[in-house]
Image: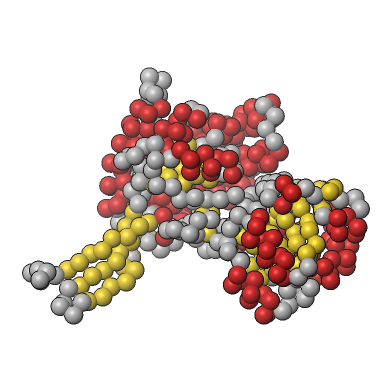
Amino acid sequence: MVERESLSPQEEVRVLAGAARAAAAELARAPSAVKDEALRAIARALQAAEPEVLAANAEDLAAARAAGLPAPLIARLTLTPDRYGAMVRGVLAVAALPDPVGEVVEAWERPDGLRIEKVRVPLGVIGLIYESRPNVTVDAAVLCLKAGSSVLLKGGREAERTNLALVAALRRGLAAAGLPPGAVGYLQGGREAAQALMQATGLVDCLIPRGGAGLIRSVLAQARVPVIETGAGVCHLFVDRAADLEMAVRIALNAKCSNPAVCNALETLLVDAPVAEPFLRQLGPALREAGVAVRGCPRVREILPWAEPATEEDWAAEYLDLILAVRVVDGLEAALDHIARYGTRHSEAIVTRDPERAERFLQEVDAAAVYWNASTRFTDGGEFGFGAEIGISTQKLHARGPMGLREITTYKYRIRGAGHVRG
């Protein structure tokens, strides 16, 4: 790693980006078998480093609690042995995936005999600015490496001890496999380091912010390098008048409670008026038992008098906590209008037995992932079969939804002629 004490943030970015650029050239040439062996070496290095990483994580957690960080951030920061094991298994899952680099997307021959291929190639050097979740350090690095790119990581200060221990293990794995450790760089420091990465024109090919709405807005406002936007998740579930209410209860509880601190968790529940009373009388006690605070519209509070009154801000809130905004709406049209106004184009779901209404919802909702009779919690690279994800894009250019290997490549055209000249 770079000796940092005498370097400004801008100098540190230049040094790390220089090493990353040189490593990216080597990765772009590396055969799939070499990259896969490097990922397996990384998995072994991570397994060996588990005591060191968990000890560093315990120090980060103690500091975070002492600083009064909110519960959702603490939840995202926490590494347990189970989570650590899942992270290592994720590395091996990525190693087992097909290599997108070199894939011929399409090929054709022109009438004059000129042959053209569109081929996937690495992006080069990818920057990632993210908060709290140490598993992102590993997921992002291994996806970038498999896709033939280097990565410059800038995690939150609250996870810095954990992230440094993880990056050290990643670099040991690369070295053991004969690939340059500079393919994974980690920027320390605070806002100045993040700003230096955002403004590293010519050094970084693509920047991906991953975190809350504040972080993403800051990156979009300040970045001078191309950005793939990953957005906040104000995710909705609409329980239609034709819903199987028992199914709807299961889906709502899973979407809200299985992991409330992630961006694909349910934040707003919309209930069709004809089924509002029977459905909420089933769901309400289960939410209370799970410790979920409900913020409801007046019609909800007539049925669940213990619910807190919802404000206008609640409809646009990404709580990342055991809080749920609930609104009774008059039909599918009203639900679509609410989602169009308050949604963040992340993940939206409908529960219904009416296929026509379901297909309309699937067609008209503008989001990266739209579900019929399933929880929004499936918006995830692993659940989609991508092995892991580098983020969930809510924009429409280049990539949308969970970003796996193919989404972090670009393409070039290879043209083969036989002395062709243009007339």
- Residue 124 vs residue 146, the one in the foreground: 124
- Residue 419 vs residue 187, the one in the foreground: 419
State the residue lying farthest toward the left: 419
State the residue lying farthest toward the top: 6
Q: Residue, x 75% and y 59% (percent of image)? A: 269
Instruction: Report x, y in % for residue 371.
Output: 63, 67
Which quadrant does the C terminus fall into?
bottom left
Look at the picture and state if 174 lies above or below 374. Answer: above
Which quadrant does the N terminus fall into?
top left
Look at the picture and state if 124 lies above or below 356. Answer: above
Number of numbered discs on residues: 0
Q: Residue, x 77% and y 76% (percent of image)? A: 242
Residue 392 in view of the camera: yes
Residue 40 in view of the camera: no
Q: Residue, x 75% and y 62% (percent of image)? A: 270
Q: Residue, x 77% and y 48% (percent of image)? A: 311
Instruction: Report x, y in % for residue 321.
Output: 72, 46
- Residue 274 vs residue 192, the one in the foreground: 274
Instruction: Report x, y in % for residue 353.
Output: 73, 77
Instruction: Report x, y in % for residue 309.
Output: 84, 48
Q: Is 15 positioned to the left or the right of 310 in the image? A: left
Q: Is 352 positioned to the left or the right of 364 in the image? A: right
Q: On the image, which quarter does residue 236 sit in?
A: bottom right
